[in-house]
Image (cartoon, helix red, strand yellow):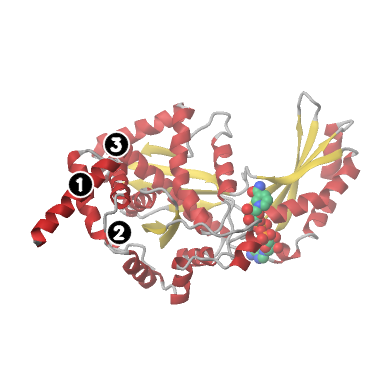
C-alpha cells in the first residue's frame, strides 16, 4: 500500500474513494461501509441506550504517513477543518527523512481496588502481596478468552495513600490486555478480586475500576523535519521557541496538547475506540511530573534539522468495544493495515507528532489564521449557497480582500452570479 496519493485533495469525494481503494486494496463492500454509514437500528440499539438515530461526521484520509518503514493511509473522523490537511503536511515533512520511528510498550492496563477502614494499611499491603498468585488466578478465571489470546492479569502493586479522611490502600491489578482496550475486562477482574482483598486485609472495598492513566501502555514516535522545509534555521528556532513556551506555561501547553489530540482523537474515533479514555490518559500523563507539560519534545539535531518526539498512553484496541461492531470502524482499522493494539498505538503517536509539528510550523511561520481562514472562507461560501464550481472563486475573492465573513460571501456570490448572467445574455 502506498500512502502518497498526489492531488487527493483536489478530487471530488467519489474520485477520492476510488483513489483510496486503488491505493489500499479495500473491497467495494468495505467502501460501502465508509460512505453508506447509516447503521441499522439493531446495531445502534445494541451500542447505547435510548437510541433514536445516528449522527454523521466527516471521515477523511490523511496521506503521506510512513511508520516504521510502512506506508499507512490514516482514517480520521473530525468536525474540525484543517486537521486532516495538517496531519498530512506533518507526515509529508517527516517522510523526507524516512518517516516516523514508532515504538510501543506492553499493553498493560491498571485496575484499581480501593480498600478503606484498615487497622494497619502497611501490613494489609504486605498481606496482599504474599497472596499474589491467588489474586491473579482469581482475576484470570474471569477472562479465559483474554488468557487464551496471550494476555491476562500479570502482577499486583500496592499503594498506601494518605488522606485527611483516613489512610487507604489501593491495590493495582496489572492486566495485559493484548489487542483489546480492556476496560470491561479489567473492571470485571477488579470486581472479582475485591472480596478476596477484603478477606486478606480486613478492610472494605469501595472503588473497583480501571485507571485511565495507562502508564503501562505507552506509545511513542520520533521524526526528523528538514530545516529547509520549515523556514530554515530561523524556522527551526521559532518552532523551538514555541515549544519552550509550552514547557514553561500550562496555559500554552493545554493548547499545544489539544492540537496533538486533534489528530489522535480523530483516528481513535474512526477506529471505534474510546476518545475520552485516550484524552484522559494523555492529559493525566502530561501532568505526571506535577507540572502540566507538552506531550511532544523538540530539539535541533547535528544537521540543524528539527528532531521531534512524542510519548503518551494509548489505551486502544483492535478487538472489543465498538471496534468490530461498527462497520466503518472495522474498515478503518483494515485501511490502516494494523493488526494489533500496539501497531495502532504507534500510528496514533505518529499522527500526534505530525499534527503538532504542522501546527507549530504554521503558527511560528505564517500564523495559524492564514490556513484556518481559507478553510473558514470555504465554509462561508458553502453556507452562502455557492455551488461546488463557485466555491474556489469566492474563497479566492475573500482571501484577496482579506474580508472573510458571511455577508461578504453572500455579496460576492451575488456579484459573481450577476456577472455570469450578463455574460450568458
Ligand atoms: P470487550 O469486553 O468488548 O472486549 C475485550 C475482550 O475481548 C477481552 O476481555 C477478551 O475476552 C476478548 N478478546 C478476544 N480476542 C482478544 C485479543 N486478541 N486480545 C484481547 N482480548 C481479546 O471490550 P474491552 O476492550 O474490555 O473494553 C472496551 C470498552 O470499554 C470500550 O467501549 C470503552 O468505551 C468501555 N469502557 C471504558 C471505561 C474507561 O475508560 N474508564 C470504563 C468502562 C467501559
19 or 407: which is nearer to us?
407
In the image, residue 414 lies at what x, y percent? 20, 50
> Which of the pair 328/74 is nearer the observer?
328
Q: Secondary structure at mark 1?
A: helix
Mark pair 1, 2: CA separation: 24 Å
In the rendered view, would you say 316 is above or below 127? Answer: below
Q: Position of residue 286 (x, y in %)?
A: 54, 36
**Vertically, is 21 above or below 259?**
below
Given contact means CB atoms under 8 Å apart, are the residues at marks 1 and 2 in contact?
no
* Residue where numbered disc 3 is placed: 367
Indicate which label's residue lies in the foreground, 1 or 2.
1
Instruction: Tell me the quadrant of the picture where the N terminus can be found.
Output: bottom left
Mark sitting on residue 412: 1
Q: Is mark 2 within 8 Å of ligand 1?
A: no
Q: Residues within 10 Å of mark 3 (few under 14, many from 20)?
A: few
Q: Is mark 3 within 8 Å of ligand 1?
A: no
Quick check: 258 above or below 89?
above
Sequence-first disc among 1 and 2: 2
Q: Residue 390's mark?
A: none
Q: Are marks 3 and 1 in contact (CB under 8 Å)?
A: no
Which residue position is annotated with label 2? 9
**What residue is at 36 percent from the left and 72 percent from the top?**
22
**Could you say where residue 356 lies in the image, as x and y percent from the top left?**
40, 43
Mark 3 and mark 2 lie on one chain; the one further toward the N terminus is 2
Question: In this image, 391 relative to 220: left or right?
Answer: left
SS for dot 3: loop
Q: Which quadrant of the rendered structure holds the C terminus?
A: bottom left
Query: Residue at the location (58% across, 52% down)?
Result: 274
Amino acid at each position: 500500500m502506498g500512502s502518497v496519493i498526489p492531488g487527493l485533495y483536489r478530487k471530488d469525494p467519489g474520485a477520492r474513494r476510488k483513489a483510496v481503494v486503488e491505493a489500499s486494496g479495500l473491497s467495494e463492500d468495505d467502501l460501502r461501509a465508509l460512505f453508506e454509514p447509516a447503521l441499522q437500528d439493531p446495531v445502534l440499539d445494541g451500542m447505547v441506550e435510548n437510541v433514536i438515530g445516528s449522527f454523521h461526521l466527516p471521515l477523511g484520509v490523511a496521506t503521506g504517513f510512513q511508520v516504521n518503514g510502512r506506508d499507512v493511509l490514516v482514517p480520521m473522523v473530525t468536525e474540525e477543518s484543517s486537521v486532516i490537511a495538517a496531519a498530512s503536511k506533518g507526515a509529508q515533512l517527516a517522510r523526507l527523512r524516512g518517516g516516523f520511528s514508532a515504538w510501543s510498550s506492553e499493553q498493560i492496563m491498571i485496575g484499581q481496588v480501593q480498600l478503606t477502614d484498615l487497622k494497619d494499611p502497611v501490613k494489609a499491603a504486605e498481606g496482599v502481596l504474599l497472596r499474589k498468585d491467588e489474586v491473579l488466578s482469581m482475576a484470570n478465571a474471569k477472562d479465559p478468552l483474554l488468557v487464551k489470546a496471550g494476555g491476562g492479569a500479570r502482577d499486583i502493586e500496592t499503594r498506601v495513600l494518605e488522606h485527611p479522611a483516613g489512610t487507604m490502600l489501593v491495590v493495582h491489578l496489572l492486566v495485559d490486555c493484548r489487542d483489546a482496550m480492556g476496560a470491561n475486562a479489567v473492571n470485571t477482574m477488579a470486581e472479582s478480586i475485591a472480596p478476596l482483598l477484603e478477606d486478606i486485609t480486613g478492610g472494605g472495598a469501595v472503588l473497583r475500576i480501571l485507571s485511565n492513566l495507562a502508564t503501562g501502555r505507552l506509545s511513542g514516535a520520533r521524526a526528523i523535519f528538514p530545516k529547509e522545509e520549515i523556514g530554515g534555521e530561523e524556522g527551526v528556532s521559532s518552532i523551538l521557541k514555541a515549544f519552550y513556551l509550552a514547557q514553561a506555561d500550562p496555559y500554552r501547553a493545554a493548547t499545544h496538547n489539544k492540537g496533538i489530540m486533534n489528530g489522535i482523537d480523530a483516528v481513535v474515533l474512526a477506529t471505534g475506540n474510546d476518545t475520552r479514555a485516550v484524552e484522559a490518559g494523555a492529559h493525566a500523563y502530561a501532568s505526571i511530573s506535577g507540572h502540566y507539560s507538552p506531550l511532544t519534545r523538540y530539539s535541533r539535531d547535528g544537521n540543524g534539522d528539527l528532531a521531534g518526539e512524542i510519548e503518551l498512553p494509548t489505551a486502544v484496541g483492535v478487538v472489543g468495544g465498538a471496534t468490530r461492531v461498527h462497520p466503518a470502524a472495522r474498515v478503518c482499522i483494515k485501511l490502516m493495515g494494523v493488526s494489533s493494539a500496539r501497531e495502532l498505538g504507534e500510528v496514533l503517536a505518529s499522527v500526534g507528532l505530525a499534527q503538532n509539528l504542522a501546527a507549530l510550523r504554521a503558527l511560528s511561520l505564517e500564523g495559524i489564521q492564514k490556513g484556518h481562514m481559507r478553510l473558514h472562507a470555504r465554509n462561508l461560501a458553502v453556507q452562502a449557497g455557492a455551488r461546488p464550481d463557485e466555491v474556489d472563486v469566492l474563497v479566492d475573492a475573500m482571501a484577496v480582500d482579506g474580508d472573510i465573513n458571511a455577508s461578504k460571501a453572500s455579496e460576492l456570490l451575488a456579484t459573481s452570479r450577476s456577472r455570469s448572467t450578463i455574460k450568458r445574455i
